[in-house]
Image: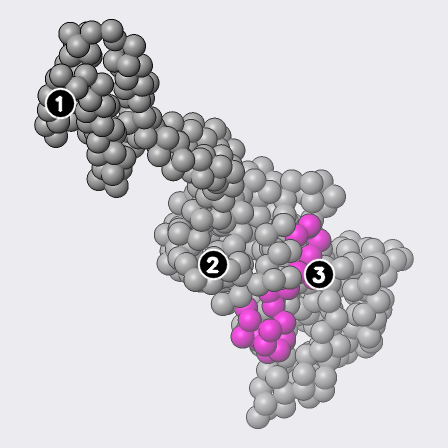
Amino acid sequence: MKDFLKVYWPLALVAVLGLIVALRFVEPPPPKQIVFAGGSPGGAYAAYAERYKTLLADHGVEVEVLSTAGSIENLHLLTVGDADVALIQGGLASEGDAERLLALGGLFYEPYWVFVRTEAGAQDYADLRTLRMTIGAEGSGTRALSLHLQGEYGGTWPDTTRLPLSGQAAADALLAGEVDVATFSAGIDAPYVEQLVRAEGIDLMDFPRAPALSRHTPALAPITLLRGVVDIGGDLPARDVEMIASVAQLGVDSELHPAIHAILLDAANAIHTPGTELSPPDTFPSGARTDLPLSAEARRYYRDGPSALRRYFSFGMANFLERAWVLAIPLLTLLFPLVRAAPPIYRWRVRRKIYVWYEDLRQLEAEGRAADSGEARERIRTQLRNLQEEIGQLEVPLSYTDDLYRLRSHVTFVNQLLGNLDPAQEVEPVSM
């Protein structure tokens, strides 16, 4: 055991030193808590945020969901670092935001609903310039998209086309005849959307130029609201309606741990893959139509799917193994040649304990042969007996016992040889 430890303790020392050095280059573990900017209570964003919270809790990650006014505030919270993850309406991010933030992909369509009183006679978005039009409250995603589209269509849009009403208040104003047009960037399940689809004297405007708009702004997509999708029995809407929609995206702080990206993508896949009334299954999540750059983890995910480790191991174990490869490569590089060299070194050390005695044995034999008297040879034979006794106390592994006994027999042979050089003396074998 002593010989074994003498050989292998340097390997253990090298492994420990390599581990210490490699640990300096290993990514830190992912956080156990993140902040998720959702939306206003009761809204679609808030509901989705709660679903993400539930799914991430299964991986041991606690999610704090913030109630916000919507996409504009969510984007601001991400930018200033007060949120790690947020749902953001497509088309709102600036070039400066793209330098600090990343996207994990588009999640669902948010149609831009334009409801017009029939009596107004507007057939195209450009016809709305002279009408009283709600475009959402300050800081809302509806307002940002409305202003963007007004800019795309060009011309002069007076203040009456930029009334700051939103949600149910805008729908009530339209029904009461206080405004001519109400716009919303909202999901199909928003109660005021269904209310206006069913209302008499209110028309849902087509966007025949939706494909062209989507080419100008990648975060916008042309969609078709299928006939009867709101109410099949009631045939609502009574025709297919071409619409423009922003793609809600999952934005993250660029410094958020990549492992959190992975479980957010898993959650997005579970939540959004089944599809909705506006998109068939497997449309989302998608790496297309985001105005923030995709994270490296998201690009890999959309290309290859979940990592092999994530398919077979839990989040914690998979993350540990993904980080551990940084340790494994240098350690294996160091240990492989050392481990191969250790057995020969061990054999050499054990055999050296045996073979080192042959130097003494050869010297005693030479001195015995050169002795010119029986008394001198007897003194050498006494030294041989002492040598035999010392060798008898030598400890070696069982597999090397044959080498040890071979040495002891050689000592006996030399002792007998020196006795036979003097026929007058009786040679007594040395006791083993």
Question: For the residue carrying disc 1, how many other residues have a C-alpha within 10 Å: few (<14), some (14-19), or many (20+)?
Answer: some
Please state which amino acid type lies under the numbered disc 3.
Answer: Arg
Picture coordinates of residue 390, whole percent (x, y): 17, 20
Query: Left or right of 315: which side holds 223?
Result: right
From the image, tell me which residue sits under label 1.
Answer: 427
Q: Determine whether label 1 and label 3 are within 8 Å by CB.
A: no
Number of numbered discs visible in the structure rendering: 3
Question: For the residue carrying disc 3, how many other residues have a C-alpha within 10 Å: few (<14), some (14-19), or many (20+)?
Answer: many
Please state which amino acid type lies under the numbered disc 2.
Answer: Arg
Above or below residue 353? Residue 306 is below
The secondary structure type at the circle numbered 3 is loop
Magenta span contains residue 293: yes
From the image, tell me which residue sits under label 2.
Answer: 310
From the image, tell me which residue sits under label 3.
Answer: 289
Q: Which residues are magenta?
A: 272-295
Please state which amino acid type lies under the numbered disc 1.
Answer: Val
The secondary structure type at the circle numbered 2 is helix
Q: Nearer the viewer, residue 103 or 11?
A: 11
Q: Earlier in the sequence, mark 1 or mark 3?
A: 3
| Nearer mark to the viewer, of 3 and 2 | 2
